[in-house]
Image (cartoon, rainbow, N blue to C red):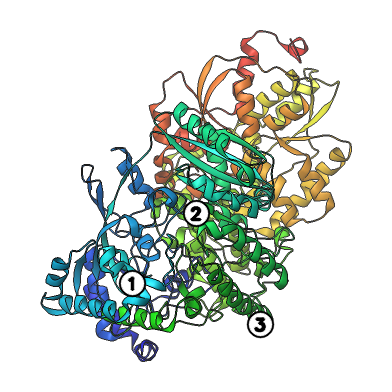
Amino acid sequence: MADAQLTSSRTAPADLRHDLERRVRGTVAFDPGTLALYTSDASNYRRVPLGVVIPETVDDCVAAVRTCAEHGVPVVPRGGGTSIAGNAIGTGVVIDTSRHLRAIEDIDPVARTATVQPGVILDDLRRATAEHGLTFAPDPSTHSRCTIGGMVGNNACGSHSVAWGTTADNIVSLDVLLSDGTRMTVGSQHSAQEWEELTRRPGREGRIYAELTRIVEDHRAELRTAMPEFRRRVSGYALDRLLPEKGRDVAAALVGTEGTCVFVLGATVRLVESPPARALAVLGYPDAASAADAVPDLIGHAPLTVEGINDRMVAALDRQGSRSRVPLPEGGAWLLVEIAGGDPAEAAGAAERMLSGLKGASRPRDAVVVTDAAHQRALWRIREEGAGLTQRTPDGNDAWSGWEDAAVPPENLGGYLRAFDALMERHGRFGVVYGHFGDGCLHVRIDFGLTHERGRREYRAFMEEAADLVVAHGGSLSGEHGDGQARSELLGRMYPESVIRAFGAFKRAWDPDGLLNPGIIVDPLPLDADIRVASDLRPELPLLSEVALAYTDDDGDFARTLRRCSGVGKCRRQSGPGVMCPSYQVTQEERHSTRGRAHLLFEMANGEVITDGWRSEEVRESLDLCLSCKGCLSDCPVNVDMAAYKAEFLHQHYKGRVRPAAHYSMGWLPVWARLAALAPAETNRAARLPGVSRLAKRLAGVAVQRELPAFAATTFTRAFRRRAARGEARTTGRRVVLWPDTFGNHLNPGVLAAATQVLEDAGWTVVLPEGQVCCGLTWVSTGQLDVARTVMRRAVRALAPLVAQGLPVVGLEPSCTAALRHDLVELLPGRESERVAEAVHTLAGFLNTYAPDWRPPRLSAKALAQVHCHQHAVMGFDAERDLIARAGIDGEVLDSGCCGLAGDFGFTEGHYEVSTAIGERELLPRVRAADADTLVMADGYSCRTQIGQGTGRRALHLAEVLARGIAARGVPGPAGRGKP
């Protein structure tokens, strides 16, 4: 029925759009760009919506749902879009509550409840309740971006359900909207008398309660015997919650209905006391099945959580590029068991007593109790990023969700795991199993061949057999993420036909016209239909053979690159460590998230919604606010490199066309800098004249609010040669190549001079590459890849002979260093480029590796250090932390993300507001608040510029700080080198 209504509605969307725009204050969008953003979530599926509504108020939700009902158009409720089962997409109108409906309306610490709107981010609620020593217990790994409304839809659980249960166990009441616009509040725990009164209420509400009564009466026996009794039974509808002995809990019965019965407008949730301290016991076992066998004994020690990981998952973290391996006890699989205590010592003692009490098969091969917070976070990172870490197999094949979160009673987990391993072997499949062992819920991504028809047939065969296997072990097809399109079709293998009929009756009681998220749970869509990666890419686009970059991590297959984003949405986080995605953190718009941009690029290649390929204005507009910070390269669990994709798109988009002015001005900055070096004083003086400055900015596409940088009176390379000619440079001993980047050479030569002093003090002779060299970064970031390739080829010609002699190369500007380390091999693939890239180091990285005995000057100072985005993404900052500590600096490394300037981004016209807003999130306020004698350190020229223009404080490069110390200790020249 819904499909027919949708088909007819597609013939006249203008009327629907007109009525929605008239009644809804928020965004109403039917344009290709917005539709493309919502064709998929974090699942394997793709369905093109008819339209998208982003409500600003709850009343907007009511108006949108009522309007869609009038037009007979289905509605798909959506939160953060992190669903893995395919239950947040559809061909009706998608209503996204995550953008604006984020109000925490009330926290009652006495009653231990909170009332929230559906778009509230879980971490925001947890921060707000932490002030009262309370927390909302369910904590899925997507806690930094999932919404409470989405958690209600999927009955989200998370790691701590062992102690506190699922979302359904922590709901007091729900404010819900029916598909016809009826609004009602449903609660929990009704007595017989209260229930009778509910059935007598007038109108639609009373009829619903009367129908629920009939469903229970008609199916009482099956609801008591055919629904597995364990916490992680999430599949289907929880109709047994309506039984009298379970309190006739309507709110809990609606939790996990995946938007198919009601639209959630708000929720009142229970809060629990957050333990003052927690210890993490890490137990090593030979394999995952052996670890699972120990779970029943561990549960007897009242843990907060029992999570399982294995060696394949740890190896995946290493393949992702983790720069510091997390120490683990001996074993091939590990249980992370969290124990609460009144203080750290009490928690650690309880964990030790638990370990000493384990006997026989439950006793681990090795174990350790972790109390250090940083070590705990590193361990939890392995677990929480599992969905992304396991998306590629060790040999590089794609791995997919689908059979993603089945659950069995914990006492059956070991047997199920062994049987599941045998099933995987029979089907020739590879996957990494991990998850909530304490509740018997397992996650796995499997290398299904979803890109071809045979692989999709094999996918169906596996899913059917896996469903039978989990049922045989008393389990549930879904233990956390819901059924969605992935598993709804399989519910008949888990439940008898009478229960399936009861599910249908339950949905019809709330949604008789089938307008809410049709095709999910009831009257399900085929599990092998609408597979996102099965969509053909447009053959007329030069996607596979004519792209400019090598895409080495995807074997040169750009189509595979476009499949890399799985949609888990870590880029949509609101706060927390890391860099990505700075523009989304400011605008909060899906199109400005890494995921949104990746989806748009995929849809551009697909050609159904976005039809103009590389010329797409929708994609260009989305990428316009991408800072090319490369934060996603390291922070995204699957290493999406949106900076590279943006460069590729701009390269293709502007082929044979006039580019924006900023591409000619800032993209060609190295050339203009060389010209300015002929007359730097005159150039600077002209740039300071008000009329000339305004005109120059307008012609160059530079934001009028920005101060133009001043060129140095003398370039570093010129000064270096003069110094050598005077005989003042070190000329003996080991040699190191110093890369004279454009920013340092022409704009801030003091940094290169300071580095020279430091390197000579460490006993090295500094040499420069021959000729005028450049890494090509400015051309890469503006998508002028043909020019960038030519420039990089010159760089390789200059560096290759020196590298062949065994000389290391030191870069001081992080973005240029990262370009030589990473972008170089993408534009000029080959062994020669790889050898050059491998020889490039940051200053600290070089000193720690090649001059380990050098003792840096001791500086008794405090410092705030800003990490450049490209350094964070490509080289890491561990060497700098170590060197700062060795220099005696009490340094706080700011985890503030991108500074907001990001090369040409913050200078470009139209970007100033976003650029400064990013800086004002943390970096600039922290610098302003710092004491006057606190050093502000930033190795990136952009970071130093943003700090200077935003706060008036001068930020120093690490080389400048060390050079100051060398000068202060009063031991000039060679006598000050090496060990004192």
Q: Are marks 3 and 1 in contact (CB under 8 Å)?
A: no
The kind of residue on which mark 3 rests is Glu
The kind of residue on which mark 1 rests is Leu
Q: Position of residue 438 (x, y in %)?
A: 51, 52
The tag earlier along the polypeptide, 3 or 1, is 1
Side of 254 relative to 309 (left or right): left
Side of 638 relative to 165 (left or right): right
Answer yes or no: is residue 237 visible.
no
Answer yes or no: is residue 433 visible.
yes
Side of 65 relative to 624 (left or right): left
Q: Disc 2 versus disc 3: distance between alpha carbons?
A: 31 Å
Circle 3 packing at 10 Å, graded few (<14), some (14-19), many (20+), is few
Q: Which mark is residue 618?
A: none
Compared with 692, 745 (above or below) is above
The tag earlier along the polypeptide, 2 or 1, is 1
The kind of residue on which mark 2 rests is Lys
Circle 1 packing at 10 Å, graded few (<14), some (14-19), many (20+), is many
User: Quadrant of the image for the C terminus?
Assistant: top right
The local secondary structure at tag 1 comes to helix
The local secondary structure at tag 2 comes to helix
Q: Which mark is residue 239?
A: 1
User: Quadrant of the image for the N terminus?
Assistant: bottom left
Residue 462 or 495: which is nearer the viewer? 495
Residue placed under numbered mark 2 in the picture: 570
Residue placed under numbered mark 3 in the picture: 453
Q: Position of residue 75 (x, y in %)?
A: 34, 76
